[in-house]
Amino acid sequence: MKKILLSSILALGLSINLSAYEIDGDLGVQWTGYKTAKKVAVSGTFKDIKININKSENLSEFLKSAKVAITTASFDSKNPGRDKSITSTLFSLASSETIYGNIKSVDEENKKLILNMTMNEVTKEVLMSYDMKDSKIVAKGTIDILDFSMKSSFLAFAKKCEVFHENKSYSEVGIAFTLPYK
């Protein structure tokens, strides 16, 4: 009986050790901007995303270890004209060449996290909800470009795109990330 109990405890210990979180693929980042009075959504990603994340047996520690750097010139909406308009206006400042992110806190019970996002040398906390499905963590939240001291860049963007946006551009941007893990 002692051998069975000891074997069960050992097996449980090994299975807990095997459930460590580690990245298993590329981090996906998505943005969604809005245009026209009907608030038509336009989405895309960035091609140059670097992540450094540590393996951990604890989900919160795994997520909080992540450090991300996104090159804004790699902006990709699948429309080269749109990409050029956005990178030449919104991200035209040298201080906006890279977006940095790290997760400050994780609330596993309510499936919420706080992302520290730095853009244009301004850091803001972004509340995001997340879900875990098919070995992927998918988090979603919203930012306002104006919160990052980018008013002049945003106004230049809105002016450049006024014909395509029917004179209505929004500073609100939906953000999301997909983190594959094993």
Image (cartoon, helix red, strand yellow):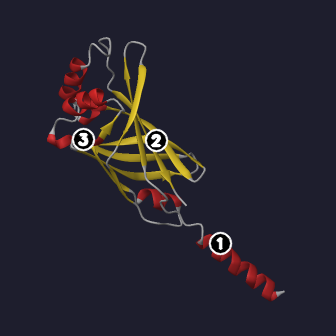
Which quadrant holds the N terminus?
bottom right
Mark 1, secondary structure of its residue: helix
Disc 1 residue type (three-letter): Ser
Q: Residues within 10 Å of mark 2 (few under 14, many from 20)?
A: some
Mark 2, secondary structure of its residue: strand
- Give the x, y percent position of residue 180: 51, 53
Of circles 2 and 1, the one toward us is: 1
Which quadrant holds the C terminus?
bottom right
Disc 3 residue type (three-letter): Ala
Q: Which residue is mark 1?
A: 15
Viewed as shown, does residue 13 lie left or right of 124?
right
Q: CA distance from mark 2 to mark 1?
A: 30 Å
Asked if the residue at tag 1 contacts the one at tag 2, i.e. Cβ–Cβ closer than 8 Å, the answer is no
Q: Residue at 69% of width from left, 81% of height from top?
A: 10
Residue 73 shows which numbered tag? 3
Q: Which residue is mark 2?
A: 128
Picture layout, residue 154 above or below residue 179: above
Out of 7 and 109, give the one closest to the viewer: 7
Picture layout, residue 166 above or below residue 13: above
Mark 3, secondary structure of its residue: helix
Q: Residue at 23% of width from left, 34% of height from top?
A: 87
Q: CA distance from mark 3 to mark 1?
A: 44 Å
